Image (cartoon, rainbow, N blue to C red):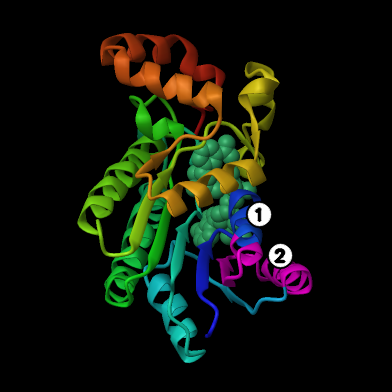
């Protein structure tokens, strides 16, 4: 029997690269996509050597509305269909909403909301037909609480992914397709280097609040296998998620108003 294929977006670094290794270790062929082709190639070579599975790399910028179609067309040209989709690619757009360029916000929505929705939409019917599928949407703990000032659409986009995952999880019940939202807290990856907040968050957060990308991805993989709709990795993050559910939004907003600046760069 041909091996199953996992398509992982944002596979050139951090949590996405960890997901690629995990799916390969579980016997999946992996299709890796992100913008940096060199990183994808290096990871693909390493995965092939270690896991002996087939790897495909597709360099694509998800800010381009044509990217999801191009990625799936490339897979189809190789005669492959997607059995597991990890919508992981993402970044933080710093600054206050009014002070940022709309084109940057538009690209952000395309990468964080539209592309993952389109990829899921295009693969889910085939998964249901074949009675097997896994969709992991990498959201964030930030999507489980009210938004803070700065990085304005980040919490909104992650909240969208949580709600989207829950709905699709219900729609695919008893079809063999599992849908999960993964909600990491602070995770060691390139994320805070890319958005320029590494020093800020390192100063403001204790080490015990941070998890490694491998542990976060392993939690996501297990949640999808167990068909849990929402997964929050790590005990401290789980406690924060529970508090965010229990406390009134007014209290949380007051907390975010006083503390949010410790984690978010509000300069444009
Ligand atoms: N790190 C954290 O503390 C944390 C916490 C909660 C949630 N998350 C979420 O976890 C996910 C993975 O982030 P990470 O922490 O692993 O960060 P990371 O190390 O910076 O990895 C981000 C990945 O997304 C890709 N990417 C970014 N923009 C893209 C674009 N326009 N088109 C295609 N690919 C793009 C990057 O690849 P290229 O640059 O090569 O394109 C990279 O592979 C994100 O959705 C993030 O929001 C992270």
Residue located 53% across and 63% down the image: 8
Residue 142 picture quarter: top left
The image shows residue 77, relative to residue 125, as above or below, that is below
The residue that label 1 is drawn on is 13
Residue at disc 1, CB closer than 8 Å to ligand 1? yes
Please tell me which of labels 1 and 2 falls first in the chain.
1
Q: Secondary structure at mark 1?
A: loop
Q: Position of residue 189 (x, y in %)?
A: 66, 43
User: In this picture, which residue range is highlighted in magenta?
Assistant: 23-51
Q: Are marks 1 and 2 in contact (CB under 8 Å)?
A: yes
Residue located 38% across and 45% down the image: 228
Q: Secondary structure at mark 2?
A: helix
Residue at disc 2, CB closer than 8 Å to ligand 1? yes
The residue that label 2 is drawn on is 39
Q: Residues within 10 Å of mark 1 (few under 14, many from 20)?
A: some
Residue located 63% across and 19% down the image: 205
- Asked if one can make out residue 265 in the rendered structure from this viewpoint, the answer is yes
In the image, 101 versus 259, the foreground residue is: 259
In the image, 91 versus 72, the foreground residue is: 72
């Amino acid at each position: 029997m041909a091996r199953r294929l996992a398509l992982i977006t944002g596979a050139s670094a951090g949590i996405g690269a960890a997901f690629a290794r995990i799916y390969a270790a579980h016997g999946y062929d992996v299709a890796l996509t992100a913008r940096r082709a060199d990183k994808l190639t290096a990871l693909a070579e390493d995965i092939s050597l270690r896991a002996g599975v087939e790897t495909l790399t597709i360099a694509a910028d998800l800010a381009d509305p044509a990217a999801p179609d191009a990625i799936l067309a490339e897979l189809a040209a190789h005669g492959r269909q997607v059995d597991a989709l990890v919508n992981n690619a993402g970044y933080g757009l710093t600054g206050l909403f009014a002070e940022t360029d709309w084109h940057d916000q538009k690209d952000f929505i395309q990468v964080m909301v539209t592309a993952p929705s389109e990829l899921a939409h295009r693969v889910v019917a085939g998964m249901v037909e074949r009675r097997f599928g896994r969709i992991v949407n990498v959201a964030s703990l930030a999507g489980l609480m009210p938004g803070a000032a700065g990085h304005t659409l980040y919490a909104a986009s992650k909240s969208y992914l949580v709600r989207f995952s829950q709905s699709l999880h219900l729609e695919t019940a008893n079809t063999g397709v599992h849908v999960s939202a993964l909600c990491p807290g602070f995770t060691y990856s390139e994320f805070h280097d890319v958005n320029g907040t590494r020093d800020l968050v390192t100063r403001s957060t204790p080490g015990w609040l941070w998890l490694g990308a491998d542990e976060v991805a392993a939690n996501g993989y297990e949640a999808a296998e167990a068909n849990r709709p929402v997964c929050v990795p790590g005990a401290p993050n789980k406690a924060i998620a529970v508090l965010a559910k229990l406390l009134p939004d007014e209290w949380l907003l007051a907390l975010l108003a006083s503390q949010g600046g410790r984690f978010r760069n509000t300069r444009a």
